[in-house]
Image (cartoon, rainbow, N blue to C red):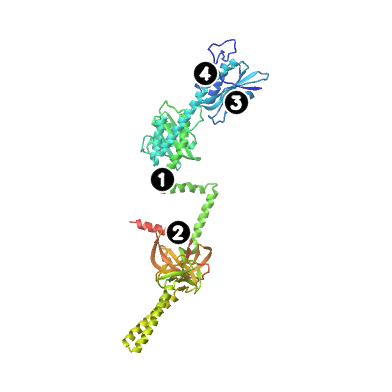
Amino acid sequence: MGTDEYRIEQPEDGSRENSEASAVSDTFLNPNYWAKLTQTTSREAYVSTWLALQCQLIEEVHAGVVVMGEPEEGPYTPIAHWPEDSEASFDMTVVAELAMSERKGSVRSSKSSHHHTSLAYPLLVDEQLCGVVALEVSERNQRQLSLVMRQLQWGCAWLETLVRQTTLTSKTRLALALELVAVSLESKRFHAAATAFVTELTSCMDCEWVGIGFLKGQHIKLSAFSHSAEFEEKNNLMRLIARAMDEALDQQALLVYPAPSDTAPRALRSHEDLARQDSVGHICTIPMGNAGDPIGGLTLARAKGQSFTEDEIDFCRYVALLVGPVLDARRRDDRWIGSKIWDSLTDTLPLFVREGHTGLKLALISTMFLAVFLSIADGTYRVSANASLEGSIQRAITAKFTGYISKSDIRAGDIVNKGDLLFAMEDKDLKLERVKWNNQKQQRQREYVEALANGDRAQMRILRAQKDQADSQIALIDTQLNRTAVTAPFDGVIVSGDLSQMLGAPVERGQVLFELAPLNSYRVILKVDEREYSQVKEGQLGSLKLASMPNQLLNMVIVKKTPVAIAEDGRNYFRVEAYIDGGIERLRPGMEGVGKVNIGQRKLIWIWTHEFTEWVRFTVWSWWP
């Protein structure tokens, strides 16, 4: 077997020799095929009729097949065979695949005893592959094959028209459905959105009126009526519309009145009453659901003589499927809070008496037991507060006189023992000053001896005073020299200060250079919220956990309450001091954590809810006239 690629050739002059095998049949064509082709509404029936006509127009056709699918996507499957109930041969399958891959007409000649030729032509619509047509004909020459291919190419225009109409109709309906969804989303309020939707649907479907309703309890309540911003629910027409929706929802079926002859019998009593009341000719009611649960209904009415087609009914069903859940969600969101709570309870409570829902029932029983337990059981009520550590005393190390730093190896965080050198100040100027005053003292001493020898008492008194002045200055300088080296007054930790970067820098007398805190004595500073401050008393016990030691629990005792509020982070706090009962070496000033003060025994339900209930009482009282 061999496969030859075939290109469609343009026909030569219009003359056709009857001696050659003509590809166009002059035999009698059954007129029923033409009538069926123009009247059928099913795509499969249309394609089958078209293929039968092609096989009659072309002589000596043994078999034919039409393969179609979504443009460029597929899957491509056979939808028509000729003769009916036949299957495509291997040669037809191969030539069809070749025509689809190369997107042009193809021919495959069979070398078997049957002497058949298979040819195929792709169905291209706007350069998109939509399918292929394949025929198996008797063997013939190239000119005859060209005429057959031309006839097949011309015939494919019918299928192209079918594809275009189908695509255009689908796109138009999809655009219209999306437009209706957009209309239902434009308004923020449910009633306005539902009214806009039914009014737009009335115009699109050329209806007399359209109504939409949603389930409330066991029956549907009419929510919106076309071209009516407000309507009376107790009006006879509105009640009949709601009953028609209930009728469709009870049967879980789309109802059309009058019912088509080819449909299953349905109860249409409410639809009949509605048609009689409003003098409309045709009614269509579509039940709406969301995730399998019924939510409402959509009713459309037309005048007499304007029935609903199958395509229109399918479109309305599609619109109800899209817009129904959207409007139902808008309706639920538009309820006031009390209605939402009540509806939630009424929807949930019946589940406890129905079969199943074991997890929900166990959750309810567990919640009830927990509520009873919390109402009976007692627990220790504790007030929590942010805590920080401070030394029980904190000594400031200052400069004893104005001078310059000469030595310091200590910085914040270092641990020092009593007598350790903290810093030393420059003493050269002091020593020179001492030498100066010592020389002056010796000079006044000599002058005093001379005045004593001369008996000059006045001069003696002056020189004695100058000598005493020099002694005082020397004593002062000696004191300052003794203070140039500053040592730790007790064992502790340097809380703040670092002079390692200030060697040679001048300092003023009284300037704080270090802060020293002891290692074995701490106090805890608690920031108690103003709402809990009255519960805390001196002498109460508590516990402390620091962020740096989360596994270590420290005991503390409240020793002092400071009645001065501190505003932080938009709330008021009071400072409460406590001492740690038994310190540990790892503690350092500045550590932070959480402290809890034991207040006493309370009911567990009160412990967990008192903050909320107190806030509610305060809020209600503040707003109460």
As shown in the figure, which amino acid type bears the numbered disc 1?
A: Arg
**Secondary structure of the residue carrying numbered label 3:** helix
Between residue 380 and residue 153, name the one nearer to us.
Answer: 153
Residue at the image point whose x is 65% and y is 20% from the top: 110
Report, in whole angstroms, how far the alpha carbon at label 1 lies from the one at label 4.
Answer: 60 Å
Q: Are marks 2 and 4 in contact (CB under 8 Å)?
A: no
Instruction: Mark 4 or mark 3: name the one nearer the start of the chain.
Output: 4
Report, in whole angstroms, how far the alpha carbon at label 2 lies from the one at label 3.
Answer: 78 Å
Residue position marked by numbered label 1 in the rendering: 335
Instruction: Mark 3 or mark 1: name the one nearer the start of the chain.
Output: 3
Residue 592 location (% of width, % of height)? 48, 63
**Secondary structure of the residue carrying numbered label 4:** helix
**Secondary structure of the residue carrying numbered label 2:** helix
User: Which circle, 3 or 1, is nearer the viewer?
Assistant: 3
For label 2, count other residues whose C-alpha is less than 10 Å away and answer few (under 14), some (14-19) or many (20+): few
* 167 in relation to 544, above or below: above
Q: Residue furthest right?
A: 113
In this image, 599 relative to 101: left or right? Answer: left
Residue position marked by numbered label 3 in the rendering: 98
Report, in whole angstroms, how far the alpha carbon at label 2 lies from the one at label 4.
Answer: 83 Å
Residue position marked by numbered label 2 in the rendering: 609
As shown in the figure, which amino acid type bears the numbered disc 4?
A: Trp
For label 1, count other residues whose C-alpha is less than 10 Å away and answer few (under 14), some (14-19) or many (20+): few
As shown in the figure, which amino acid type bears the numbered disc 3?
A: Leu
Residue 327 location (% of width, % of height)? 43, 40
Instruction: Mark 1 or mark 4: name the one nearer the start of the chain.
Output: 4
Residue position marked by numbered label 4 in the rendering: 34
Between residue 266 and residue 137, name the one nearer to us.
Answer: 137
